[in-house]
Image (cartoon, rainbow, N blue to C red):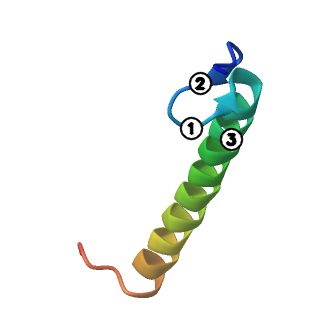
Amino acid sequence: MSDIDKVYPTGLSIAESQEIHSSLIQGTQIFGMIAAFAHLLSFIYSPWLK
């Protein structure tokens, strides 16, 4: 009953898990860019270290 292509405990194949992982990494990078941009805008409009 055990499928050799499936990864325990998720039941995903290696290709499926790599696809989800790459989407997660891309989403994290986009979130980081948006957060950095928001911090830059908040620093420009109200500089907190000057």
Q: Which quadrant is home to the C terminus?
A: bottom left
Label 1: state its secondary structure.
loop
Residue at position x 56%, y 38% in the image = 10
Rendered position, 28 above or below 6: below
Type of amino acid at the residue the image marks with label 3: Ile
Near mark 3 (Cα within 10 A), the count class, few <14, some 14-19 or many ≥20, is few
> In this orientation, which residue lies closer to the viewer: 33 or 20?
20
The answer for how far apart the CA atoms under marks 1 and 2 are is 6 Å
> In this orientation, which residue lies closer to the viewer: 11 or 25?
11
Lateral position of residue 47 relative to residue 39, left or right: left
Q: Are the residues flagged by discs 1 and 2 in contact, CB closer than 8 Å? A: yes
Residue at the farthest left position: 49
Residue at position x 69%, y 18% in the image = 3
Type of amino acid at the residue the image marks with label 2: Val
The image quarter in which residue 13 lies: top right
Type of amino acid at the residue the image marks with label 1: Thr
Give residue 44's position: percent from left, percent from top.
Answer: 46, 78
Say which residue label 2 marks. Answer: 7
